């Protein structure tokens, strides 16, 4: 499910459910403090080519705050969950940032900022949306507990026309935490839902459709992943790479036009100044990185490997999921 997430509107909607002004103010102050603290923490933890866009991190931190809120409101101590009250909007797990349309409809004097065009969709991989994921991917224990959001924030995810991002939660397995490896040290017992390790034992076809496919260094939207495994056998690596790059370029030009149109339509406002739209690959701006032929090759190789490792039967491929259930999927023509 995809939702446009307008942080101020969501905050105001939830605030309206409190009765007193004091409660409303307290809720708003705490929400904004949490967002600010989270952005500062992510900024200091991010490394290398990870996005440092304050606008993106702030958008993501607001989404996280919303997910924390609805999760807290619906969780119960032992299994199951409570229904989310009708007054609270149910959004996600894929959150789209507001566009210039939202800005011009919400503000008397719309602030047409470049950063609006640079913001990327965010998918949240959290048990609020996917309760079935509360299982240790290593030992299948259902005693795994939620630990925290990833320290450094989101992971970048490649898409068909545009890059996206995803943020996951850390699961902590109590059973694995008590085990020792050959060297006498505690074995790995924390797994992020955006890590390759978490999804290693899953058959790709059994991963919920909204969740990107994660590899060691990068993630892929489900749509891009499906496109690669379907088209790769009948296309060359370079040809497929070129087609996807072309789709990215078209989307980049569309976004540039949308920015120009938004500036033109708000020429009478206080912010009519047309700024220089960034280059497509500018890390501090649009930051678009389409996939390479090497990545396409990696995706297809991993897909083929997992299919081969399955125990083929007459009707399908028998796959062990982390919950140790045996699931049947149809044989794939190769
Ligand atoms: Zn475990």
Image (cartoon, rainbow, N blue to C red):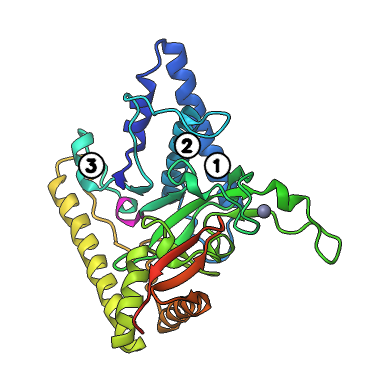
| Residue corresponding to mark 1 | 38
Left or right, 19 with respect to 104, comes to right
Whichever of labels 2 and 1 marks the residue nearer the N terminus, that label is 1
| Residue corresponding to mark 2 | 65
Whichever of labels 3 and 2 marks the residue nearer the N terminus, that label is 2
Main SS of the magenta part reads helix
Left or right, 56 with respect to 180, comes to left
**Helix, strand or loop status at disc 2:** helix
Q: Is residue 118 magenta?
A: yes
- Circle 3 packing at 10 Å, graded few (<14), some (14-19), many (20+), is few
Q: CA distance from mark 2 to mark 1?
A: 9 Å
Q: Nearest to the eye among marks 3 and 2: give it.
A: 2
Residue 325 percent across, percent down from the top left: 52, 58
Q: Provide the residue span drawn in magenta.
A: 116-120
Q: Nearest to the eye among marks 2 and 1: give it.
A: 2
| Residue corresponding to mark 3 | 102
Q: Is residue 46 among the parts visible in the rendering?
A: yes
């Amino acid at each position: 499910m995809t939702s446009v997430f307008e942080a101020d509107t969501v905050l105001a909607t939830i605030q309206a459910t409190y009765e007193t002004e004091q409660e409303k103010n307290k809720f708003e102050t705490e929400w904004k403090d949490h967002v600010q603290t989270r952005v500062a923490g992510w900024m200091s933890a991010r490394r290398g080519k990870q996005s440092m866009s304050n606008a993106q991190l702030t958008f993501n931190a607001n989404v996280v705050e919303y997910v924390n809120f609805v999760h807290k409101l619906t969780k119960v101590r032992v299994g199951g969950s409570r229904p989310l009250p009708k007054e609270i909007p149910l959004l996600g797990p894929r959150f789209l940032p507001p566009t210039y349309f939202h800005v011009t409809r919400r503000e008397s004097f719309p602030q047409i900022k470049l950063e609006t065009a640079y913001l990327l969709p965010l998918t949240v991989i959290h048990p609020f949306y996917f309760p079935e994921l509360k299982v240790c991917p290593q030992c299948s224990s259902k005693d795994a507990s939620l630990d925290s959001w990833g320290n450094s924030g989101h992971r970048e995810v490649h898409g068909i026309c545009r890059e996206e991002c995803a943020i996951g939660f850390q699961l902590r397995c109590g059973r694995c935490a008590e085990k020792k490896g050959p060297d006498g040290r505690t074995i790995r017992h924390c797994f992020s839902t955006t890590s390759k390790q978490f999804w290693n034992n899953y058959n790709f076809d059994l991963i919920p459709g909204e969740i990107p496919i994660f590899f060691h260094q990068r993630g892929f939207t489900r749509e891009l992943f499906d496109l690669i495994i379907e088209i790769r056998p009948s296309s060359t690596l370079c040809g497929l790479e070129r087609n996807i790059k072309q789709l990215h370029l078209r989307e980049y030009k569309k976004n540039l036009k949308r920015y120009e149109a938004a500036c033109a339509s708000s020429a009478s406002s206080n912010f009519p100044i047309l700024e220089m739209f960034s280059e497509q690959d500018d890390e501090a701006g649009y930051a678009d990185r389409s996939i390479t032929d090497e990545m396409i090759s990696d995706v297809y190789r991993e897909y083929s490997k997992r299919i081969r490792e399955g125990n083929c039967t007459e009707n399908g491929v028998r796959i062990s999921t982390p919950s140790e259930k045996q699931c049947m999927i149809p044989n794939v023509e190769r």
